[in-house]
Image: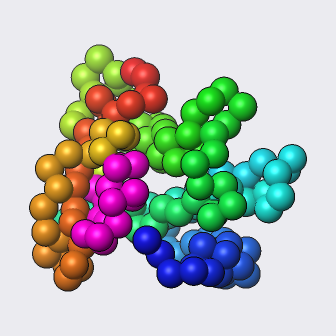
Amino acid sequence: MPPAGYLRGLDGYIRRHALTDSNSRPAKDDHTLLLLEDEDLDPSLIGVLSLGRRADGNGWHIDLAAIASEHQGGATDRGQPFSTALLAAAYEHIRRREITNPDAAPTVRVTGSVHRDNGRARAVLERNGFIGFIQDPNLPGHLIAACDIATAPGTST
């Protein structure tokens, strides 16, 4: 579980820096920042997801995904959990970038890491198609898993 105030601090960071930082990256990084907002809610920023192409060129990696503490456990007006809506938007973004012919769609994987003690985050990834959790070789104390975009929940071909 993130420390108290972490997500509120994240909200402030996103509003002050993340959009500018993401927009200033070179295009070759193909980095994307997705925000889930609802103007009728307070605070209106529900969650954020940052993703980019993997350094090895083999798919995409979610760098950061968070739902503001005030909205954790919440759902869209259609009943979809906010965390699922955020991941579905990421999947759809990747599909639009990678899959031009659905009949001959390549295997496109997205990876994500979670701290080994963050059971809630791992459960969200598992519910949204991530499998094969193993020790992340780049982040001590973290597990990494992958999801095939073609079979990800909430996506269509």
What span is colored magenta in the figure?
A: 111-125
Q: Which of the pair 149/5 is nearer the observer?
A: 5
Specify whether residue 118 is in view.
Answer: yes
Specify whether residue 93 is in view.
Answer: no
The N terminus lies in quadrant: bottom left
Does residue 135 lie above or below 88 as drawn?
below
Q: Position of residue 140 (x, y in %)?
A: 20, 82
Residue at the location (41% across, 37% down)? 95
* 31 to the left or right of 77: left
Residue at the location (50% across, 81% down)? 3
* 83 to the left or right of 99: right
122 magenta-colored: yes
The C terminus lies in quadrant: top left
* 12 to the left or right of 144: right
Residue at the location (83% across, 58% down)? 42
How are the colours assigned in the image?
A: rainbow
Q: Position of residue 143 (x, y in %)?
A: 21, 66
Does residue 131 lie above or below 101 as drawn?
below
Q: Which of the pair 134/19 is nearer the observer?
A: 134
Q: Position of residue 92 (x, y in %)?
A: 48, 38
Q: Which of the pair 112/68 is nearer the observer?
A: 68
Q: Position of residue 102 (x, y in %)?
A: 34, 22
Residue at the location (78% across, 48% down)? 38
**How many labels sit on residues?**
0
Does residue 20 lie above or below 54 as drawn?
below
